[in-house]
Amino acid sequence: MLIIADFHIHSKYARATSKEMDIEKLANYAKMKGLNLLGTGDFTHPKHLKDLKAKLKEFDRGIYEYDDVYFMLTTEMSTNYVENKKLRRVHHLVHSPDFETVEQIIDVLSKKGAKTTIDGRMSMNISSAELVEILHQINKENYVVPAHIWTPYFGCLGSKTGFNSLRECYLDQTKNIHAVETGLSSDPTMNWRVSFLDQFALVSNSDSHSPWPWRLGREANVFEVKKITYEEIWDAIIKKDKKRFLYTIEVDPNYGKYHYTGHRQCKVVLHPKESKKLKNICPLCKKPLTIGVLQRVEELADREEGFVPKKSIPFKTLLPLYEIIMFVYGSINRNSKKILEIHDSLIKSFGSELEVLLRVPREDLLNFTDEKIANAIINVREQKIKYTPGADGEYGKPIFDDKNFRVLNVTKQKSLEDF
């Protein structure tokens, strides 16, 4: 049984999320995307938890179902604390096996001052290690995955509030961490350069705040199992079993919002070599730059580029179909009816977006769309396109040809000579 899973999403009750993020819409758009297993997101929020209990039907312990889409109980939690005289703000993706365990989590953490109604994320002033220990004591089948580990502000290895290793962050509870989430701004090749990450499986999720196919499942995990169960999925992850955990789906890390180092306000985007020459200070306003994921990986890497660990899970690099079409036509309007018609027509013709992106031959694509779109899909599949890198909270942009690059009015990355 082929399972394509996106475990990290949010609900409509979380801050800065679409009001369409409910179970009905998620199930509908998951099928359009080609996903058949979703995390629920935000299970500690009382209104969302009520929705989940009312709408999800138990398929197997730890696996729930709604409208032919499977769900696992997940949420993101935020720990905010001071350690070694430095503010630490770390996000964690939490998996739980059943609603009874979820209720226990809410009860125990609420007594420690955790807030459940302000945002979709439960936020608390305890250390990351204490959170893992509490969750493991409640139920050994609670799994904690450090979320988007390289993100500057909330990743456990991030440049702003993070640590220099997982052991520094989770202390003796590192033994209960089995996987890490790479985030949009890094891919497995970058993580493979850091040897202390070898003991953890690398998982990829969208962290989606809206249900649309160009957000949901833009990063995902692909499994082949005899039967979908909570235990089976997690056993495949923990053991990094290539026969069951087939590959992850990634976006190019340049597309991520924090790949390069930069300063959004001044439109400064710099490769680590250039930012280091500037001592990480914006050349225009002289304020500190936001150290990007690429530079942070370079700081912690103890291997050269190109190293591949023996037990590494393969990956495939894609880009959401809607964004391929949008950038090919040089549009900056995400609500374009023309682009949506092309997008929906391709999905209807071939069954799902991931089917289009991963498998449909160019010759078949040409029967349903024009040559520019067909070529772009194949070039993304074969990693033959370039990007202007994202930095300091702004997404990167794919470049399909010089003409469309100019239409989009994107300023090329500056070098030191430009300042």
Image: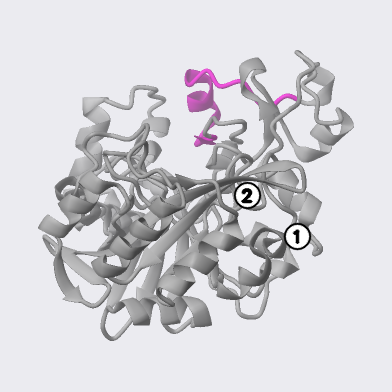
| Among the two numbered marks 1 and 2 on one chain, the one whose residue lies closer to the N terminus | 2
Q: Position of residue 415 (x, y in %)?
A: 78, 26
Number of residues whose C-alpha sits closer than 10 Å to that of mark 2, classed few (under 14), some (14–19) or many (20 or more): many
Extent of the magenta region: 396-414
Q: Residue at x 42, y 55 (%)?
A: 109
Q: Residue at x 29, y 59 (%)?
A: 38
Residue 260 is tagged as none
Does residue 360 show up? Answer: no
Q: Amino acid at mark 2?
A: Trp
**As drawn, is 29 to the left or to the right of 122?**
left
Residue closest to the eye, 318 or 230: 230
* Magenta highlight on residue 407: yes
- Label 1 belongs to which residue? 305
Task: Assign a secondary structure to mark 1.
Answer: loop
Number of residues whose C-alpha sits closer than 10 Å to that of mark 1, classed few (under 14), some (14–19) or many (20 or more): few
Q: Is residue 236 above or below residue 17?
A: below
Q: Position of residue 4 (x, y in %)?
A: 33, 65
- Say how the picture is coloured: one colour
Residue closest to the eye, 263 or 122: 122
- Label 2 belongs to which residue? 150
**As drawn, is 90 to the left or to the right of 372?**
right
Q: Which of label 1 and label 2 is nearer to you?
A: 2
Q: Amino acid at mark 1?
A: Glu
Q: Is residue 138 above or below residue 288?
A: below
Q: Is residue 353 above or below residue 56?
A: above
Q: Position of residue 298 (x, y in %)?
A: 77, 51
Q: Residue at x 35, y 46 (%)?
A: 374
**As drawn, is 103 to the left or to the right of 287?**
left
